[in-house]
Amino acid sequence: MSRGTNGTIAPKTAIAAFVHQRRAAGDGLITILEDAKSINETQFSPPLTEDAVLAAVVAAIRTESDTAAVERALQAAADAPPPLTDQGNAERLAIAHGHELRYVPGLGWRAWDGRRFKRDTDGAVVGEWS
């Protein structure tokens, strides 16, 4: 398990363990997300940003290959639709294709091919989805 600099369990690792435990108990994604936000505020100092909590929950769920549920959770967790800006476009791309698309700084775009994240050498996948 990942540990923080003071020897405690790192917040993202703790949230991932919490998500797996709650999913195994059959809890719904929205409930898990709201409870993870609450745990973040009460147990971590300093707390993670709300975006970081959401990312930790989504990452834990992705490991369970539950991509449709991830998309629903992301959409339900949003208080308002993303703005009509570059940032909003990036958020919409992440909601629609985040489970199968990654950007790695220094290496470029990667697309899930069913087995691994493969380099999108010609930009075809990113161009198709953006």
Image (tube, rainbow, N blue to C red):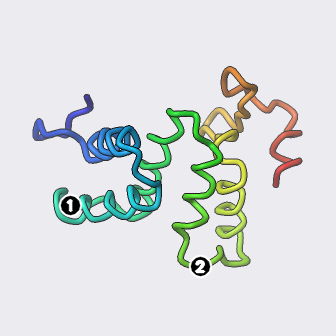
> To which residue does mark 2 refer?
80
Residue at the limit of the structure toward the top, as seen here: 115
Give the residue drawn at x 27%, y 65%: 38
**Left or right of 19, for residue 40:** left
Secondary element at tag 2:
loop
Give the residue drawn at x 59%, y 49%: 69
Residue 128 in the image: state x and y as whole percent: 88, 47
Amino acid bearing label 1: Pro
> To which residue does mark 1 refer?
46
How many dots with numbers? 2
Give the residue drawn at x 57%, y 60%: 74
Question: In the image, which disc is placed on residue 7?
Answer: none
**Front label number (1 vs 2):** 2
**Dot 2: within a 10 Å radius of its alpha carbon, few (fewer than 14), some, or many (20 or more) residues?**
few
Amino acid bearing label 2: Ala
Q: Image height check: is 33 above or below 125?
A: below
Residue 5 in the image: state x and y as whole percent: 16, 39
Give the residue drawn at x 82%, y 30%: 121
